[in-house]
Amino acid sequence: MTTTHKTAPTTLPRLLGGLEHADGLATLDRHVGFHGALTVAAQPGRPNDMLRESVRASGLGGRGGANFPVARKVDAVLGERRRPVVLINATEGEPPSRKDHVLLRGAPHLVIDGGVVCAAMVGAHEVIIAVEAGSQREFAALDQALAERERRHVDGRLKIILEIVPDGFVIGEERALINALNGGPGKPTYAPPRPFQKGVGGAPTLVQNAETAAQLALIARHGADWFRSLGTDAEPGSALVTLTGAVAHPGVYEIPLGALLDDLVAAAGGLSAPARAYLIGGYFGTWIDAARTSGLRLSNADLAPLGGGLGARAIVALPESACGLTETARVARYLSEQSAGQCGPCVHGLAAIAGGMELLARGDGRQLPDIERWIGLVTGRGACRHPDGSAKLVGSALTVFADEVRRHTVDRKCTGNGTPVLPIPKRAATGRTA
Ligand SMILES: Cc1cc2nc3c(=O)[nH]c(=O)nc-3n(C[C@H](O)[C@H](O)[C@H](O)COP(=O)(O)O)c2cc1C
Ligand code: SF4
């Protein structure tokens, strides 16, 4: 491989750089030609402390939804005795999110480099990259990239394995993913043990999202200061956002964290219809009234006073022609059917909430007090955050669409035009996948 030393990009795009052409950076030469070579190598059994300190200084938070500091996870894995492994979570089961898919197809080497960086930080001998069965193009891009690296002896003794797991929303939860990789059902288990204690094959496992890995690949090249030159002090760097709904050009965009929502919408060609509200953070996110979004910045700190967060950074602009209650009822049903079906709050609570929302969307508000009570009952319970996330979404709908609630229950009127906005995967129609 030819070694090129590239100048670090001082502006955006960073992760999406080089992807404007149809083939993106799928080949190693194009990848190295654009980003430069990764000079860090994984040494099994020998953690790279300098690299870990650089990642700590970068302040990178996980991009899979929870924004958990990467360096703290690395420390936890290093605190265990057994030989660790790295797991790159490339499942992206969140229906309105496409950021990881775009990266995996266009820049598979960047994600793989990120796996190498993770392995170098913890001294792992093995990296597993897990994709969903339905992500055939992403699988093909990674498979081809790995074959090319093997032919050209890029990763030395480090073993990098590509694994396929069943499709579904909950499979992306780290313990569900680990269970599936260990040959069990793809369902979360109660913690502890946590993945850093006992994960794939019983080994301490560093789990990072595919975009987190790609960010690490750039931090290893350009350093912490470069990374922090975008974003806010508390939430540094750039991030990928999937913007869909009532915008002229829906798609995946790269923003500095803390960017204005208005600027993101402008980058997507502006609104294609007046927006009633925005769903921010995907299906575990919250609705935010469009009237409150002028000047709103996209960071967890800015969204917190509105009860929201960036989550998986999927944003949907809901047009005024759609009914927020109907949309939420559809998603509540989907989330209830996607539950792993093993904990009370999911089995009984989410199904009841979905049923109540469906009645409400049809103009029957008799279960409204029950929905509010059920939201309280499921929150904080269950083996994973699925009930919390689902309940938060429904709770925010009842607040933001309070006028719709009145219109439905008092005037018995739904002003929605019936065209669905929020995506529900077709395969979900077959029932549970987790
Ligand atoms: C129900 C559920 C679904 C999840 N789905 C995904 C997913 O599709 N992709 C992902 O990276 N993380 C997903 N997560 C978060 C993972 O459990 C885990 O926190 C993440 O992969 C860690 O990577 P990060 O720290 O780099 O974000 C999900 C969590 C829950 C509770
Ligand atoms: S809380 Fe729900 S999704 Fe999570 S493990 Fe339990 S049943 Fe499955």
Image: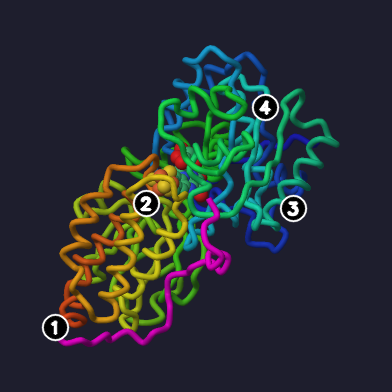
In 3D space, how far apart are the residues under numbered discs 1 and 2 (Cα atoms)?
30 Å
> Disc 4 or disc 1, which is closer to the eye?
1
**Residue 407 appears at what percent x and percent y?**
18, 82
Q: Which residue is mark 1?
A: 410
Q: Is 415 drawn above or below residue 77 in the view shown?
A: below
| Sequence-first disc among 4 and 2 | 4
Q: Amino acid at mark 3?
A: Ala
- Few, some or many residues within 10 Å of mark 4 (<14, 14–19, 20+): many
Q: Do tag 4 and tag 2 residues touch (Cβ < 8 Å)?
A: no
Q: Is residue 432 found inside the magenta-colored segment of the image?
A: yes
Depth check, mark 4 against mark 2: the one in front is: 2
Name the quarter where the N terminus is drawn.
top right
Mark nearer the viewer, 1 or 3: 1
Q: Which of disc 1 and disc 4 is earlier in sequence?
A: 4
**Dot 1 surroundings within 10 Å: few (below 14), some, or many (20 or more)?**
few
Residue in the picture at 72% in, 37% down: 4
- Looking at this view, name the residue that lies furthest to the right: 151
Q: Are marks 1 and 2 in contact (CB under 8 Å)?
A: no
Residue located beneath label 4 in the image: 126
- Label annotation for residue 161: none
The range drawn in magenta is 410-434
